[in-house]
Structures are given as structure tokens and as C-alpha cells.
Image (tube, helix red, strand yellow):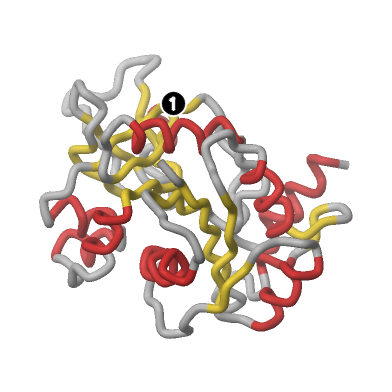
Amino acid sequence: MRILGIIPARYASTRFPGKPLAMIGNKSMLERVVEQAHKSRSLDAVLVATDDQRIFDHVLSFGGKVVMTSNTHESGTERCLEAASLDDGLIDAVINIQGDEPFIQPEQIDAVASLIEDGADIATLAIQLPYSVASDPNKVKVVCDSNGRALYFSRSPIPFFRDGAQEGAKCLKHLGIYGYRMGSLQQIANIPSSYLENAEKLEQLRWLEAGFEIRVAETDFESPAIDTPDDLLKVLQSLS
């Protein structure tokens, strides 16, 4: 199976314009993501997909592989599909790696790829965290069946403990990395937005609502989220 790692990278961002080019030490955030992805044992190639010439030129400057994609895409999923179609090889599956995850572990990429190789059409990651974080709407939660298939994703606390969460209760926080078999990627990129997706502003609910199965692997590592300049400052302070 040939698996392509794709890193969608946009320059425009409401909270942090130019985020992929932000420097962490002597390397950009995006270069660090590319380096981590190259350490994965499962990926046959790593490709940055962008719609911005500055990002395109930057990736070329450090020797990365990059393609220019449309600036009309509404999601990273759509950008991944176009990038995969522009690649010069036969692709069996794609791993969509976030461009703002400079500390992603190659083992996490491998875990998602393993689910795809095991027959999953769509796969992702989650981590167990104390239930105290469940009320944070910026932390997306997922609940799964006994076979690791996602039942629902939400910004609200799930599960909801009617009688109050007991000491030591956990929730599963979703991590934004996805794997898709090419056939599934082609299908989900063309599904119209859905009721549940619009309610929670979570694209993966569109796929569940359309009847697709999403397999979830658990990880014990959570990299720091870098969504704003303040987040980046905290990371830089932690590294100093």
C-alpha cells in the first residue's frame, strides 16, 4: 500500500496569519512538521499542499515537496484530494497531517496508517484526558464503540455524567490527524455539509452522518496546540 502524507498549509488565518511560517528556534513551524512526517515508517512520501506562493517558495527552500492547490477549498480534506491527484504516483491512501503540529510524533502517524492498512476507510487519533477538560469547547471530544469506531464527536462534554463525574473520570480528546483510503477521500470530499456538522462546526460529523465509519486509535502523547501568537509564545518559553 502506498501512503502519501499531505500537510495542508494556508497562509490566511483569522487568529494567526502566516502561522506555517512562524519560527520555532531556527526552523519554521511547517519545516518541523515536514521533518517529523518524514520520520514516519509508514509514509512513502510527504507533500505540502498550499494556496500561497510564500509557503510554496519556503518549502522549496528547505528541500521539501510542495504543490500549489486552489484557493477556493473550504477544508483541508478538499485540499488533500487535489494534492493527491496532482502527485505523480499511484496513491492508495492519504494521511492528512496538520501544518501547525510541529511536535507530532512519527509513531502517531504510524498508528493512523496502521488502521488504514488494517482495512479502515477513515482513521484518526484520540487521547484520554481528565474529564475536567471536557467542558472546553475548543477541545473536541469523541466517544467510540467497543471496537474503536467513532460514535460521535462533540465540543460538549461527552459522555455526560447524569449523576456527576466520579473522581478519575476520563474523556477522549480528538486529535486532528486523519487517514483515508483514496476511494473514501474522493467520496467524502464531495459530500455536502450536514446538519450535525453545521451545529458543531466539525467536518467529521458530515462523514458520520453520511454513514462512513471512522476508526480511532488512542495515543498517550498530546502536542501543544498552536492556534494563536500567544500559543506560540508559550511553546517558545517552554523550550528556552
Q: Residue lying furthest front in this view?
A: 89
Q: Amino acid at mark 1?
A: Pro
Locate the N terminus and report the quarter of the image it occupies.
Answer: top left
Name the foreground residue: 89 vs 212. 89
Foreground residue among 138 and 107: 107
Picture residue at 39% right of the left edge, 15% below the top: 168
Determine whether, in the image, residue 157 is placed left or right of residue 133: left
Say which of 86 and 131 sits in front. Answer: 86
65 on left or right of 42: right
Q: Quadrant of the C terminus?
A: top right
Task: Give percent across and percent down for residue 157.
Answer: 29, 39
Residue where numbered disc 1 is placed: 130
* Residue 86, above or below 164: below
Q: Residue at the location (53% across, 55% down)?
A: 98
Relative height, residue 187 to residue 25 (above, below): below
Q: 58 or 146: which is nearer to us?
A: 58
For label 1, the SS is strand
* Horizontal side, residue 127 vs residue 48: left or right: left
Q: Which residue does the image show at 59% across and 64% down from the upper left?
A: 48
**Relative image position of residue 139 (x, y in whole percent):** 42, 46
Q: Residue at x 16, y 28 (%)?
A: 162
Q: Classify mark 1: residues with Cα within 10 Å, few (<14), some (14-19) or many (20+).
A: few
Q: Position of residue 84 (x, y in %)?
A: 44, 64
Q: Position of residue 103 (x, y in %)?
A: 66, 42
Quadrant of the rendered structure where residue 191 is? bottom left
